[in-house]
Amino acid sequence: MLFSDANRPTSLTKAVDLSGGARSGAATGENADMLLDIRGLKTQFALREGVVKAVDGLDLRLRRRKTLCVVGESGCGKSITAWSILQLLRPPGRIVSGEILFHHPDGKVVDLAAVPANSAEMRGVRGRHISMIFQEPMTSLSPVHTIGDQLTETIRLHLPVTKEQAKQQAIALLGRVGIPKPEMRFSSYPFQLSGGMRQRVMIAIALSCRPDLLIADEPTTALDVTTQANILELIKELQEEFGIAVMLITHDLGVVAEVADEVAVMYLGRVVERADVYTLFEAPKHPYTRALLRSVPQLGRTRGQRLASIEGMVPNPFERPSGCPFHTRCPDVIHGICDRIEPPLVNLPDGSEARCLQYDPEYALMWAAPDLAKTVPTKPTTPAVVVPPPVARQIQEEVCLEVSNLKVHFPITKGMMRRTIGTVKAVDGASFTVRQGETVGLVGESGCGKSTLGRSILRVYKPTDGSIHYRRDKGEPLVDLASLNARALKPYRTDIRLIFQDPFTSLNPRKRVVDIIGEPLRANGMAHGKELNDRVAELMEKVGLRPEYMTRYPHAFSGGERQRIVIARALVVGPHLVVADEAVSALDVSVRAQTLNLLQDLQNEFDLTYLFISHDLSVVEHISDHVAVMYVGRLVEFAPSEALFANPRHPYTEALLSAVPQPDPRLRGRAQRIKLHGEVADPANAPSGCPFHPRCAYATDLCTNVVPPLRELGGGRRAACHYAEELNLRGVA
């Protein structure tokens, strides 16, 4: 719950000692279940270019045993808020003012903002009373220490137990968070675990001392839909079991709708709206919140439509707008008012709060009576949320790509002589077709072979068997790319291009944008000098980047702009087929909407064909004409998008659809999620029969012993299930 300066509670019985200690005293009345009370927090970074006000006067409250979700675009200060609470800031970052009042269970109140970061008192808070789950477990876990060592270190640091007792507690915790064979995994290293398993280890470490508050910073962003659902369910179960509070930082509004009690929306370092989860989704107050909610693709509701997107980007931290910080992107802006006056946080009758002049009694009449606003000097403005009508796209009957029985196997070697002891069957007999001008979505859990399949089509990997027939242009014959040598493949390198998942690591930080985008032109001898610069400038304009920025380096761009650079580099040579490998999974909801609209616009303009690889099924349903579902190197279902989401024919597809979080809190608990136990089968040691049978609720002896073929079901549908016609599987309503 949030409070404005004029409405902060003052019922603490003892004053807080701002020198770093705290006085004991039980909270009374309203504060009896208060856990964290942040007041006027300001965290800044003093850089050569100026001062970055990452958190700029934040007010935030969290009660015991509740879940508070903090949402907003990248650069709004969500993660810096979490790091400030735990004093994890690195120079030149520092807290310059404000309070972070932490209420201990014994009644003691500590201002964490005043406690030295490296003090024994702060180290006693971290892990023991407040713990954190970081976004990327691979960078948070030590690669040279076993899982058991890292768990027991945390336990012994905070609890008076012996080494053996700590080990037993650690093994029990690993089992509690759903890691199979915890005694064996205790001695494993992080690289030996899947992404979902590593995230479970992070949760086990975070909960090892039963903290009062768990801060989870984007804990499921990089996970596939079933693993995400399992992790969120696990956090909820452990929260109820241990009575902890959770602060969940996320940009996934579906996750927010599923788990939040209260929601705080941040923009440029401040909370602009706070409400309980039902109020926020049903009656959002702030224009920024409304725009975020409109940007979300919803299963069964937004297919074929353009997504509403927020114009522009979060402002440069060195060029913060005057007045309301959102006025440069706001559809309700009144110039002369919003760009001059900084709005206060207003308490509203329904218990929510919003930082907008629409709700300030002194200015509210201008929005209630639009004619009055004409008396205020205005200037033309482009609406921040624009939803043009969808453009009809022509999908041709001519095949662009035909993959037949494709296999990509990697040998497992051992010893100095590199003796082959096994085979990883990353792709094991995939077959599908893509027509010219259409988008085929490829979905499945991590480890099922999606990216390997995409890269083998680009011939990054040489197929072990099968064919990849590709047609360059209308009327031309199909050519089997799988059979071509490196020299024969060269002319096709410009025809099939890849959009990478991570714009941060796929761009060379030492090269200018003109060199990054123009490199394929130069490498293929297609343009040089002024012609190259002109083509780069033209394409930058097409993807929504200013051509005058071509001499800048990647670090000067936001995440969404960097993804546009990646897209421009893929399209600069005029390809026919684009493989987009998780092209929007790392983006904020608003930037993701912009990118999806851009991909559809470019497809219409250049007659592109897409193979769209993603673990986000709401995005796949929105953009795809057909969907291929993959499991352990094989396609288990292929169907038109609408048919697959409404009426799946494979149990694995049904389970994936049931795990998609819907951005509507009223749907909580209405549909029973199908919980898949265990991990994706090992492609080096796949089960006999149907590879999905160990996790399938409908499996029989036939499934255990006989591999089901991918067979035709009519209506352009295929499924690899013995009982595809008999099962009545649940789709998305």
Image (spheres, grey):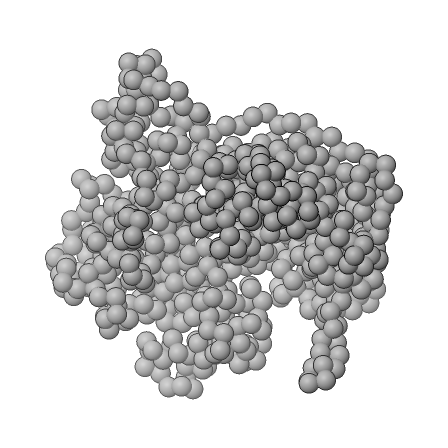
**Residue 335 sits in quarter:** top left
User: Going by the picture, which residue comes out furthest to the front?
Assistant: 529
Q: Where residue 160 sits: x, y (%)?
A: 32, 81
- Residue depicted at 22% across the width and 66% down the height: 116
- Residue depicted at 51% across the width and 59% down the height: 231
Q: Count the marks.
A: 0
Q: Where residue 38 sits: x, y (%)?
A: 25, 52
Q: Where residue 10 sits: x, y (%)?
A: 15, 49
- 603 vs 686, nearest the viewer: 603
Q: Which quadrant of the rendered structure holds the C terminus?
A: top right
458 to the left or right of 550: right
- 489 vs 122, nearest the viewer: 489
Q: Looking at the picture, does residue 433 appear above or below residue 19? A: above
Would residue 700 be seen by someone viewing this image from the given angle?
A: no
514 to the left or right of 572: left
295 to the left or right of 421: left
Would residue 17 be seen by someone viewing this image from the given angle?
A: yes
- Residue depicted at 33% across the width and 23% down the height: 334
- Residue depicted at 20% across the width and 52% down the height: 97
Q: Looking at the picture, does residue 599 appear above or below residue 562? A: above
**Residue 393 sits in quarter:** top right
